Amino acid sequence: MDLVEKALVSRAKQQDIHAFAELVELYKDRIVSFLFRMTGNREDAYDLAQDVFLKVFSNFHSFDSNLRFSPWLYRIAQNLAIDFLRRKKKIVYLDEPLGDGDDRVWRLRAQTLSPLKWQSLGI
């Protein structure tokens, strides 16, 4: 962490909103890009980035100033993205109708290869 960034982190940790705004400006594009790679959706990445910086600001008191800031920031971003993806994931129960009646369930099962088919393919 360079001296300017370390000074910004120190001031932001003391709830200096201007120092925090400079940190956001310094990292926002990188965090959005990181989150976009994780989610595959630009709007979700921007929403999550906002959540990341809110979480950073509200939890700065727990940040150890002896450590580098960026790994802590990226870990928060990663954890929020993982939580988001878990909530977003659709759960499909194969023993319940899927909307088109039994035909759709049948098609889903028909796409599954049997063990004999796997063996004949040499897999």
Image (cartoon, rainbow, N blue to C red):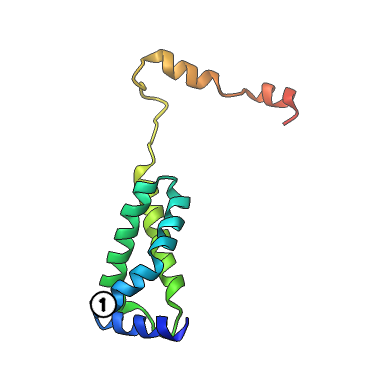
Q: Position of residue 93 (x, y in %)?
A: 39, 30
Nearest to the observer: residue 8 or residue 111: 8
Q: Residue furthest top?
A: 103
Nearest to the observer: residue 97 or residue 70: 70
Q: Quadrant of the C terminus?
A: top right
Q: Residue at x 43, y 48 (%)?
A: 39
Q: Quadrant of residue 60?
A: bottom left
- Residue 59 appears in view: no
> Which residue was labeled with disc 1?
18
Q: Quadrant of residue 115?
A: top right
As drawn, is 107 to the left or to the right of 92? right
Label 1 SS:
helix
Q: Position of residue 83 (x, y in %)?
A: 37, 53
Other-residue count near label 1 (Cα within 10 Å), few / some / many at <14 / 14–19 / ≥20: few
- Residue 63 appears in view: yes
Q: Position of residue 13 (x, y in %)?
A: 30, 81
Amino acid, disc 1:
His
Q: Quadrant of residue 120?
A: top right
Q: Residue at x 45, y 56 (%)?
A: 33
Q: Residue at x 55, y 21 (%)?
A: 111
Number of labelled discs? 1
Query: From what the image shows, is residue 80 above or below residue 74?
Result: above
Q: Position of residue 69 (x, y in %)?
A: 42, 76
Q: Residue at x 28, y 71 (%)?
A: 57
